[in-house]
């Protein structure tokens, strides 16, 4: 069954098919390479042996340890952004977000998200070492709302990852649930798993209902702004799997 499912996903990725007029477009391999090059320094020293379960230690301790590791590397590599400089990203927006402080630049073209990578770690089944890869997987699946990695920062309770994304104005509309279903099921090869999840053996995606404003449309392209991606395997395995499907 797994081999059959993989063949279906490979076929869908190669077809770059359309679903009822909505374009299903995936990142290219060169785009994925570029994104990963921005976080390569944080992969140094990591190994699969370090990826354990939380029976060997508390979740909080693992998150604190990984946060300190990423902050330390960021300071050394010059990608650390002090909290007092967050305001340079623009006006802070009072948007409902359980994990990010959000800024909109003066031209209203770019959103900056200062994200607490562990805020939704339980919902996402996110291991501490998954955090640096999370946005890379989003970019492969949803390139129309791709994130640019800006740097690492720190708040009173730990690490923050700073990402930028194109700002979508009010000119975009809310797509139908049918369009969303077609994109995720026909386009990404996922299946409905429970009531609010679209899943395969690697990931489960949620928070993509037409009743919210987390998915927008311009009539031909769907924009998944900030879907929740739950990991069923270590993020590095998920990333390598989807990367293998790209051209």
Image (tube, rainbow, N blue to C red):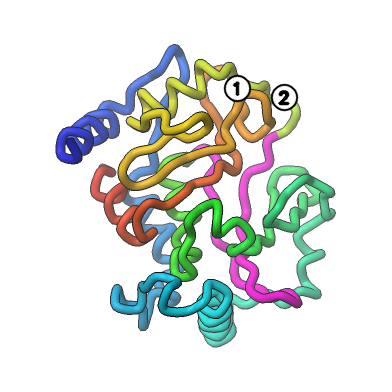
Count the labels in the image: 2
Q: Which residues are magenta?
A: 144-168
Left or right: residue 66 compared with residue 10? right
State how far apart marks 2 and 1 are (Cα): 8 Å
| Residue 147 in view | yes
User: Quick one: SS at disc 2?
Assistant: loop
Front one among 219 and 62: 62
Left or right: residue 228 compared with residue 19? right
Quadrant of the image occupied by residue 159: bottom right
Q: Residue furthest top?
A: 20
Left or right: residue 247 compared with residue 89? left
Give me the disc on residue 218: 1
Residue found 71% across the figure and 53% down from its top: 98
Residue 63 point in image, percent of width and height: 55, 74
Front one among 136 and 117: 117
Residue found 42% across the figure and 73% down from its top: 55
Front one among 82 and 31: 82
Residue 173 point in image, percent of width and height: 67, 21
Quadrant placement of the C terminus: top left
Is residue 145 within the magenta segment?
yes
Residue where numbered disc 2 is placed:
171
Q: Are marks 2 and 1 in contact (CB under 8 Å)?
A: yes
| Label 2 Cα crowd, 10 Å radius (few <14 / some 14-19 / many 20+) | few
Residue 38 point in image, percent of width and height: 46, 66
Above or below residue 53? Residue 143 is above
Mark 2 or mark 1: which comes first in sequence?
A: 2
| Label 1 Cα crowd, 10 Å radius (few <14 / some 14-19 / many 20+) | few
Residue found 37% across the figure and 29% down from its top: 191
Q: Residue furthest front?
A: 55
């Amino acid at each position: 069954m797994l081999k059959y499912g993989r063949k279906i996903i490979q076929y869908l990725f190669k077809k770059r098919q359309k679903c009822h007029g909505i374009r299903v477009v995936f990142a290219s391999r060169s785009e994925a390479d570029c994104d990963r090059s921005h976080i390569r320094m944080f992969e140094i020293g990591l190994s699969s042996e370090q990826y354990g379960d939380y029976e060997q230690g508390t979740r909080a301790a693992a998150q604190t340890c990984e946060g300190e590791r990423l902050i330390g590397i960021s300071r050394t590599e010059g990608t650390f952004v002090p909290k007092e400089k967050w305001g340079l990203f623009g006006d802070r927006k009072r948007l409902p977000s359980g994990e990010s402080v959000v800024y909109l630049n003066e031209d209203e073209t770019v959103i900056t998200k200062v994200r607490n990578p562990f805020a939704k770690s339980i919902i996402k089944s996110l291991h501490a070492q998954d955090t640096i890869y999370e946005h890379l997987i989003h970019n492969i699946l949803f390139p129309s709302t791709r994130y640019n990695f800006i740097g690492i920062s720190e708040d009173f309770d730990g690490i923050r990852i700073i990402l930028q994304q194109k700002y979508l104005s009010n000119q975009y509309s809310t797509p139908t649930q049918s369009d969303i279903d077609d994109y995720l099921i026909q386009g990404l090869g996922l299946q409905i798993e429970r009531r609010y999840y679209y899943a395969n053996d690697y990931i489960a995606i949620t928070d993509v209902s037409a009743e919210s404003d987390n998915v927008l449309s311009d009539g031909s392209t769907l924009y998944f702004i900030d879907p929740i991606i739950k990991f069923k395997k270590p993020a590095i395995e998920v990333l390598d799997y989807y990367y293998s499907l790209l051209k």
